[in-house]
Every structure is written in C-alpha cells, then in structure tokens.
Amino acid sequence: MNSPRHIAIIMDGNGRWAQQRGFKRIKGHERGAEVVREITTYCANHPEIEVLTLYAFSTENWKRPKMEVEFLMKLLDNWLKKELATYQKENVRFEVIGDISRFTPALQERIRLTKEATKDNDRLTQVLALNYGGRDEIIRACRRACEAKKEITEENFEEFFDAQIGDVDMLIRTGGEKRISNFLLWRIAYAELFFTNTYWPDFTPQELETLIEEFKGRNRRFGAI
Ligand code: IPE
Ligand code: IPE
Ligand code: MG
C-alpha cells in the first residue's frame, strides 16, 4: 500500500478540449494552466507526495505554429508572475528541467527569480519540464560528466541532470494517447504507467486520487519475485 513519492504527468489534450468546444486551441492551454494549480495544491496537501513533475513544453513543441508557441511562452511568464503567491502559500518549491537557454532572457530571468524565491519551501517540489526532451537531458548530462572528467554510474548519473528529483513512481498521461513523447526517459525506468482519456483541462484532483488508489493496489516487483 505504498503511496507515490514522485508523480509525473504528461498534460495532454488541451487543444482537443478547446476545439471540441469550438474555441481556439489556446483557450485549452489557458484552462490547462488553472488545472496545474488545482493539481499542485492537491499534491501539496498530501504529505506522502514529495515531487510533482509536469510536462509543459517539449523540445518537439517548437514545431507548432509560431503563434501557439508565442502564446505558450507568454502564458508561462504570466503564470509564474501570478502563481508565486500560490507557491508561497502552499510551501511549494519551484524547479525546472529542460534547456531554457532557448527562451527569451526575460523569461529565463522570471524562471530564475521564481526558483530563487521558493528555494526554501519544503512541502512539495513542483518541477516544470520546459523545452524538455528526455534524450536532450541525457546527452547534456553526459556532456557535463565529460567536462567534469567524471565517470558515470547508474547511481551518480542524476547528479549531472538539471535537477535532482529522483525516480518517478507514477507516470500519468492525460488526453488518450499511449506514448511517452520523450518525457523523463531515465527516471521512468520503473514507473507505474497510467493513461486516461480525460483531456488535461478536465482532469481533477478526484481523478488523480482515484489513480493513486489504483497505484497503491499495484504490485511493484522491481525485477524480484
Ligand atoms: C498539451 O496539449 C499541452 C502542450 C503540449 C503544451 P496539446 O496542445 O498537445 O493538446 P492536443 O494533444 O493537441 O489536444
Ligand atoms: C507531449 O504532448 C508534450 C507536452 C505535454 C508538453 P504532445 O502533444 O506534444 O505530444 P505528441 O505530439 O502527442 O507526441
Ligand atoms: Mg498533444
């Protein structure tokens, strides 16, 4: 009956949620951002959950129309500005994985400031995966290890990642697709996988709770018997 320490979510289905309602895709991203707050607050109020990692923008998402990419960047900037109050209220530390060097200097600065302002919060760590690719993360980690002239082992490899957040216990993908889309490749080696057809803007703390109950019923053997 173990609870998940680290939950990771591929927040998919924003565009389809909006289109189904006759809205532009960006409406789905707006509603999706509110769900991020609801799910983060839920996790912050469940002490057994220590890390919540959310896939917000992939290294592949640059292929989207320029307008949508620009909207997502703006949304992120506004979000961080506005949500600092929530991070402080819920005692949440903000962390980032991904190569943010491709973002505008202003957005990079906003990310830095948010991390700095929340660095002593210790109830929950919320990790946003931004310009994140699992392969990119592994390659960059290998480069760092080479530069430091350090040998890589299974135990120390994570040291070279952008953030040390540990292995994922529970990986959830909303939106109906059953794929990993280059998310957290190293850390999901033994994660329990959950796929729900619910579009991210419709995902609720109640559904998360139901999935966590299912997680607790799973028999994790890690290769043993
Ligand atoms: C996920 O929703 C959010 C991001 C990738 C930023 P999508 O935008 O992929 O929504 P669908 O999958 O097209 O419905
Ligand atoms: C994965 O969703 C990336 C994020 C949720 C940020 P996508 O919608 O980009 O993935 P694919 O295209 O279905 O693989
Ligand atoms: Mg999608």
Image (spheres, rainbow, N blue to C red):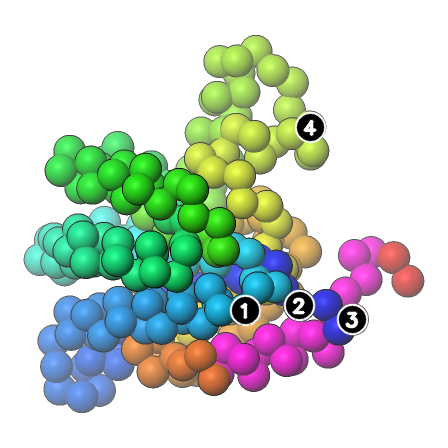
Disc 4 marks a residue whose amino acid type is Thr
Can you see residue 132?
Answer: no
* Label 2 Cα neighbours within 10 Å, binned few <14 / some 14-19 / many ≥20: some
- Residue under pointer 3: 219
Q: CA distance from mark 4 to mark 1?
A: 33 Å
Which quadrant does the N terminus fall into?
bottom right
Which quadrant does the C terminus fall into?
bottom right
Assess whether residue 214 is covered by the magenta stretch: yes
Q: Classify 145 as above or below 184.
A: above
Asked if the residue at tag 2 contacts the one at tag 1, i.e. Cβ–Cβ closer than 8 Å, the answer is: yes
At x 30%, y 77%, the residue is 201
Q: Which badge, 3 or 1, comes first in the chain's sequence?
A: 1
**The image quarter in which residue 199 lies:** bottom left
Asked if the residue at tag 3 contacts the one at tag 4, i.e. Cβ–Cβ closer than 8 Å, the answer is: no
Per the rendering, the mark at residue 3 is 2
Per the rendering, the mark at residue 46 is 1
User: How far from the left and from the top, in percent, is residue 3?
Assistant: 66, 68
Disc 2 marks a residue whose amino acid type is Ser
The answer to whether 206 appears left or right of 102 in the picture is right
Q: Nearer the viewer, residue 177 or 205?
A: 205
Asked if the residue at tag 1 contacts the one at tag 3, i.e. Cβ–Cβ closer than 8 Å, the answer is: no
Per the rendering, the mark at residue 153 is 4
User: How far from the left and from the top, in percent, is residue 2?
Assistant: 72, 68
Asked if the residue at tag 3 contacts the one at tag 2, i.e. Cβ–Cβ closer than 8 Å, the answer is: no
Q: Which residues, given as a range, are shown in magenta?
A: 207-223
The answer to whether 27 appears left or right of 60 in the picture is left
